[in-house]
Image (cartoon, helix red, strand yellow):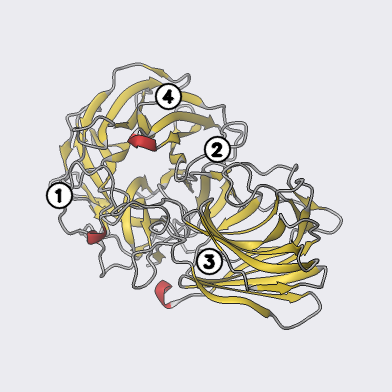
Amino acid sequence: MVTITNPVIAGMAPDPSIIRVEDDYYIATSTFHWTPGVQLFHSRDLNTWQLIGYPLDSKKINLMGTDTPAGIWAPHLSYDKKRKEFWIAYSHMVNMSGREFNAESYAIHSKNINGPWSEPIYLTSIGFDPAIFHDEDGKSYVSILEWESRPNHQAPGHIVISEFDISNGKQLSEWHRVTQGFTTRGAAEAPQLYKHNNHYYLLIAAGGTGYAHGVEVGRSESIFGPYEPHPSMEPIVTSSPKHLFSLGDPDAGQFQMYNPQSRIQKSGHGSLVETQTGELYLAHLMSRPLMGTQFNPLGRETGIQKMKWTSDDWLEMFDGSNLAKVSVPGLSGVSLTKQRNDLIFNFDNNTIPQEFMTPYHFQDDSWVRVNKNSQNLRIYGGNSLFSKDKPNILATRAISFNYEIKTAIKFKPLHYSQSAGVGLYYDSNNWIYFNLFWSEEENRKKIRISQSKLSERIQYNYVESPVDSETIDVKVTYNDGKVSAYFKDKDNETFKTIQENIDVTYLSDEGVNGAPGEIGGFTGLFNFIGSVDAYQHESYADFEYYYVTSKESSEEK
């Protein structure tokens, strides 16, 4: 028997929504303030997943100025067998201040998973995490969390369901409030509907986005309920099976629910799929903390668990427990293919690799392009990295606790506000940047460290080195929460040290701007190359290559 090893999609890949169409499996995940919007992955074996694209482009969304972790939340992927169409429902969270959580929910559709995708169809502003259920009779229903902003009411609100004409977004019935959760964990969200043996099953995320996260289920003979909770009165999948009463807590880290016996944490927000042979699997988000901490730099990743129907038609994990596992039985009769994790980009095919994402604004040839003659990636300087408007960086998800980034940079700064380099990025308030710049005091090019922690600039006044050559190689290593950086002239063999073992554990979901007891972010760490020009936006840097190679650490074995 083959074994699936979690996570199946490492790095920022939260809120997975999974479907199967014939022999192909697809997963959609959240992207928040990153563009393009919604990551789509493909697999044939449920273990090895390849990024295939993003359906939300600059014509469909505008994320400039977005406060993280707002943006594009919880895409729900479905397939309408009657129309032979793929559908994605998603929320665009535009405000989280005052716990108002203003979100606009939309749906898009396509005959092909690779697009083109329709223009967004407006659904509702009642809350967030919409999902579309295509019933056997051709009717369609939207389930969503109705966000509760009133004081002295149980937060975050009710799960509600309504019939829709999804072709035009017209609501055909009232919203039916069906549950505020099926256990005492509370914080119900992300409702998804399924049908099995004449029962409707409502799968929800609960317990908050932290260490108490889990998957809950209820069932009903009517789509509008009432829904009967699972007999266990506990989550059917979680990393922390210990009983918890947290009704009324809208969303919290619940750090006391950390399970020291489990390598994976925060398992929840599940989505169900049936294989060609009738096997059941549930894709879910999960996290992996740095050893000895409760910090999760890689953010919320995608895991998968094998499931089954019991003799009385309840859904549960294949082994009868509710504890999410690292190792899971794979598909029967299917050989696993090897997952490619390293990124080797030489920019020799004149296209920008699709793995590159950008925060807040979109990639276009006004600021980034591949130079066909030199086969370099050219990035024109944009706003500073503090900007939530147009920071001109290209970034890839960090997927390992031990890895190395290498690049070669050709850059000719003329003004002190111009820079180019490589670094680690969480959001506009949290990053570290090893960059070339122009020193007016010394009238020469140098390399330095720039850093932000919780929006405060960190100065390294005495860690600067002169750079004499036109092009330099830069190497950055990340090892279990500590980063080191090195550089060398193009013709030299030996790297010089910029700085070693800088503690960047704060570049994690728990380390960024969180109130006590809360998760600060929901996204994860990225690696990036980029350029800044607060002078004329005319300077540019040429990057010859971009390599990210992972090394297995003790935390990943």
Q: Is residue 465 above or below residue 390?
A: below
SS under mark 4: strand
Q: Which residue is mark 2?
A: 63
Left-right relation of 117 to 265: right
The Cα–Cα distance between marks 1 and 2, rounded to whole angstroms, is 36 Å
**Closer to us: 499 or 172:** 499
The Cα–Cα distance between marks 1 and 4, rounded to whole angstroms, is 33 Å
Any part of residue 196 in sight = no
Q: Is residue 174 above or below residue 160?
A: above
Residue 472 in percent (x, y) is at 76, 70
Say few, some or many: other residues with alpha carbon within 10 Å of mark 4 (under 14 / 14 to 19 / 20 or more): many
Q: Which residue is mark 3?
A: 338
Q: Which residue is mark 4?
A: 123
Q: Which residue is mark 1?
A: 245
Q: Earlier in the sequence, mark 1 or mark 4?
A: 4
- Circles 1 and 2: CB atoms closer than 8 Å: no
